[in-house]
Image: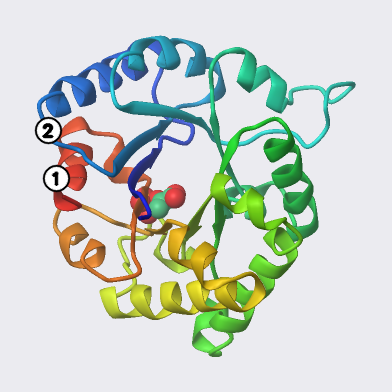
Amino acid sequence: MRDKIVAGNWKMNKTLPESKALIKDIKNAIKNEELQNIRVIVAPTFVNLRSAVKKAKKSVVEIAAQNMHQADSGAYTGEISAEMLKSIGVKIVILGHSERREYFGETDSLLSKKVDQALNSKLEVIFCFGEVLEDRKSENHFKIVESQLKNGLFHLREKDWKHIILAYEPVWAIGTGETASPEQAQEMHKLIRKLIAENYNQSIANDVSILYGGSVKPTNAKEIFSKEDVDGGLIGGAALKADDFVALIQAIK
Ligand code: PEP
């Protein structure tokens, strides 16, 4: 049975004290909740990861990094390696977020290297992908998503898929207040599962968690999360306030 997941991407938000306080508030708010098969993940900025790992210890909250470099180590000023993340207790990394693709020029081919590097270092990967508005308007969205998956992930071995979480994030819905309808999300998630079944097998397709991301909030989460192939959300804005984020966790139960 695949996991349900609520993951918060804090992006370039929260100072160290704010980051500590948010983790504390989330922890306290969910400590008495029954969260069977539900994973709660938050992704603070790099400099706050070490403290976040400590703060989240002995709770269900898991800590993810927002990015990582594809090389083992070396002369890459300002970059962070998989082993560095591992060495401070981080076990999950988000790769391919649309902001990395758009503002930092990350391509499918670069991302496939990052995915390999993360898996080689035994990190779990939340792999993000999704079409831009023009692709949707021109009805190319299925093709784009298929090519992002093919180029980024379909070189993986069957056994690698245990360490992959997918996050379908239509770029036009990220931070815009515009959400894909629950039907649009379900339609795409179903296609994604079908592509995995065709390229691998049905059991891998059934087991992989596929998150939806794009302006998920307490007011729309329940409907989106209720769709058969939607296994949770990757959340931006609504992950920055404990009350909202906890409401999303409750919405998936
Ligand atoms: C995101 O950046 O992954 C995201 C989904 O952001 P928001 O929830 O703010 O749209």
| Residue located at (58% from left, 71% from top) | 201
When the figure is inspected, residue 241 is found, relative to residue 201, above or below; the finding is above
- Residue positioned most to the bottom: 138
| Residue located at (27% from left, 15% from top) | 21
Q: Is residue 229 left or right of residue 171?
A: left
- Residue 33 numbered mark, or none: 2
Compare residues 181 and 158 and report the one nearer the observer.
158
Give the percent coordinates (x, y) of residue 223: 18, 67
- Residue 137 numbered mark, or none: none
Q: Callout 2, which amino acid?
A: Glu
Task: Answer with the quarter of the image where residue 95 lies.
Answer: top right
When the figure is inspected, residue 115 is found, relative to residue 49, above or below; the finding is below
- Residue 250 numbered mark, or none: 1
| Residue located at (36% from left, 19% from top) | 19
Q: Callout 1, which amino acid?
A: Gln
Q: Is residue 21 visible?
A: yes
Q: CA separation, marks 1 and 2?
A: 9 Å
Disc 1 is placed on an element classified as helix
Quadrant assignment for the N terminus:
bottom left
Q: Is residue 232 left or right of residue 30?
A: right
Compare residues 225 and 14 and report the one nearer the observer.
225
Give the percent coordinates (x, y) of residue 148: 66, 67
Instruction: Tell me whether circle 1 and circle 2 mark residues in contact (CB < 8 Å).
Output: yes
Give the percent coordinates (x, y) of residue 159: 64, 51
Q: Is residue 161 left or right of residue 235?
A: right
Lower sequence index among marks 1 and 2 = 2
Task: Answer with the quarter of the image where residue 180 lies.
Answer: bottom left
- Mark 1 surroundings: few (<14), some (14-19) or many (≥20) residues within 10 A: some
Disc 2 is placed on an element classified as loop
Give the percent coordinates (x, y) of residue 216: 28, 56
Compare residues 184 and 99 and report the one nearer the observer.
184
When the figure is inspected, residue 159 is found, relative to residue 132, above or below; the finding is above
